């Protein structure tokens, strides 16, 4: 398989254990509970169940808990990382996906405990090790955040 191979079939229902096989993040920074679907080299849908038990709610904001926008974008990036690793298959062994840039970030509604954040990411382009994505996050079918972001695939042992 090559990075341009788009004949791969969609992968569905990636549970949290399989998510953790694909990306190195762990609680409290794992912000994807499952990935409902990955269409290799094209798109993915990730799910984050937002719970009052999240540590950031202690200070953001006391008495009015709101999920920080940067963590919503991180959820997009982690979903994209699962998509990249799933797309590359064995080629991804020993690699990490590093954030490079965030553009056009917009936050439209607050995300609060009890919300089910549905994160849609789609590949805009990739050239070599650099991938660019568009991400949108929804709660109850309503757009809550969006961004364009880029990431680089690097060997785990390389300095970032």
Image: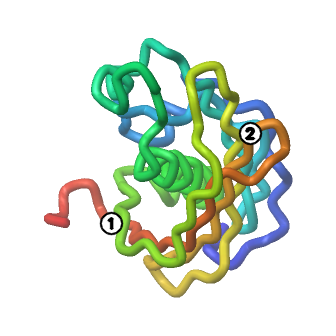
For the residue labelled by badge 2, is the local secondary structure a helix, a strand or a loop?
A: strand
- Label 1 Cα neighbours within 10 Å, binned few <14 / some 14-19 / many ≥20: some
- Residue 99's disc is none
Residue at screen point 79% across, 71% down? 6
Cα distance between the residues tagged 2 and 1: 32 Å
- Is 2 placed left or right of 150 in the picture? right
Give how far across and how far down residue 62 sits, in percent.
Answer: 34, 22
Work out which residue is located at the far top of the displayed protein and give it: 53
Name the residue nearer the viewer: 95 or 91: 95
Tell me if residue 87 comes above or below residue 139 in the rendering. below
Q: Are marks 2 and 1 in contact (CB under 8 Å)?
A: no
Give how far across and how far down residue 67 sits, in percent.
Answer: 47, 36
Name the residue nearer the viewer: 44 or 76: 76
- Is 6 placed left or right of 60 in the picture? right
- Is 126 placed left or right of 68 in the picture? right
For the residue labelled by badge 1, is the local secondary structure a helix, a strand or a loop?
A: strand
Quarter of the image for residue 53 reads top left
Which quadrant, please, contains the N terminus? Answer: bottom right
Name the residue nearer the viewer: 105 or 83: 105
- Residue 154's disc is 1
Residue assigned mark 2: 139
Residue at screen point 81% across, 60% down? 8
Quarter of the image for residue 154 reads bottom left
Work out which residue is located at the far left of the displayed protein and give it: 159
- Label 2 Cα neighbours within 10 Å, binned few <14 / some 14-19 / many ≥20: some
Give how far across and how far down residue 50 sits, in percent.
Answer: 57, 25
Residue at screen point 85% across, 54% down? 9
Circle nearer the N terminus (2, 1) = 2
Which quadrant, please, contains the C terminus? Answer: bottom left
Tell me if residue 63 comes above or below residue 45 in the rendering. above
Give how far across and how far down residue 142 sits, in percent.
Answer: 80, 48
């Amino acid at each position: 398989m090559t990075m341009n191979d788009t004949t791969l079939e969609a992968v569905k229902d990636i549970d949290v254990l399989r998510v953790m096989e694909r990306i190195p993040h762990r609680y409290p920074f794992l912000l994807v509970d499952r990935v409902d679907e990955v269409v290799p080299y094209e798109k993915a849908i990730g799910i984050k169940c937002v719970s009052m038990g999240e540590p950031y709610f202690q200070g953001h904001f006391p008495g009015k808990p709101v999920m920080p926008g940067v963590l919503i974008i991180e959820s997009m990036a982690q979903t994209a990382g699962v998509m990249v690793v799933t797309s590359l298959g064995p080629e991804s062994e020993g690699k990490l996906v590093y954030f490079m840039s965030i553009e056009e970030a917009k936050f439209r509604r607050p995300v609060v405990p009890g919300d089910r954040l549905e994160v849609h990411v789609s590949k805009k382009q990739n050239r070599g090790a650099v991938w660019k994505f568009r991400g949108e996050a929804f709660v109850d079918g309503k757009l809550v955040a969006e961004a364009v972001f880029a990431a680089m695939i690097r060997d785990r042992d390389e300095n970032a």
